[in-house]
Amino acid sequence: MAKKYHVRERAFLNLKTDMRAYVIGVVEDTRDKLACCKEHNSGGEIQLEMADCYDDIALHFEMNTYEERENSLYKIRKLAEIIIAVKNAIEIEVESLNERQAVTPHDRASAAVH
């Protein structure tokens, strides 16, 4: 039987795709595995890798025991929470910088005169 996946995605993290930064996310779908024996009672492939122009990181999500599965859920939820918070903060900063840079030097000078 061919493997099925919940997620199997690779993407570049820069608009210019000749730059190295990337993310790879893979989670195998094991719901159809039989529960009859130990051979079929393990987790499938899980991969989360990220890289910028210089460094790589590969995160591991262990699924063998109940405790490992709970820790893997905690890890990915915490990552998602922080990534969303950073995304929201960057969006605020981009908007703020765009507004400040939209004002020409002449406008700034005339606004400073009382």
Image: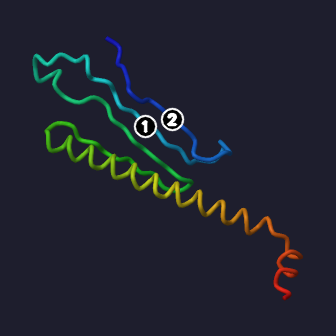
**Residue labelled with disc 2:** 10
Mark 2: few/some/many CA within 10 Å (<14, 14-19, 20+): some
State the image coordinates of residue 54 (x, y, percent, origin top left).
Answer: 53, 56
Image quarter where the C terminus lies is bottom right
Which amino acid lies under the numbered mark 1 shown in the image of this protein?
Gly
Residue shown at 30% from the left, 49% from the top = 75
Residue 43's place in the image compared with 113, above or below, is above
State the image coordinates of residue 53 (x, y, percent, origin top left).
Answer: 56, 54
Tell me the number on the disc at residue 25: 1
Within the image, what quadrant is residue 7 found in?
top left
Residue shown at 23% from the left, 30% from the top = 43
Residue shown at 46% from the left, 57% from the top = 85
Q: Secondary structure at mark 2?
A: strand
Residue shown at 10% from the left, 16% from the top = 36
User: Going by the picture, which residue comes out furthest to the bottom?
Assistant: 114
Does residue 57 appear to the left or right of 106 in the view shown? left
Instruction: Please name the colour scheme applied to the rendered image.
Output: rainbow
Image quarter where the N terminus lies is top left
**Disc 2 and disc 1 in contact, CB within 8 angstroms:** yes
State the image coordinates of residue 82 (x, y, percent, origin top left).
Answer: 41, 56
Tell me the number on the disc at residue 108: none
Residue 5's place in the image compared with 52, above or below, is above
User: Going by the picture, which residue comes out furthest to the top?
Assistant: 1
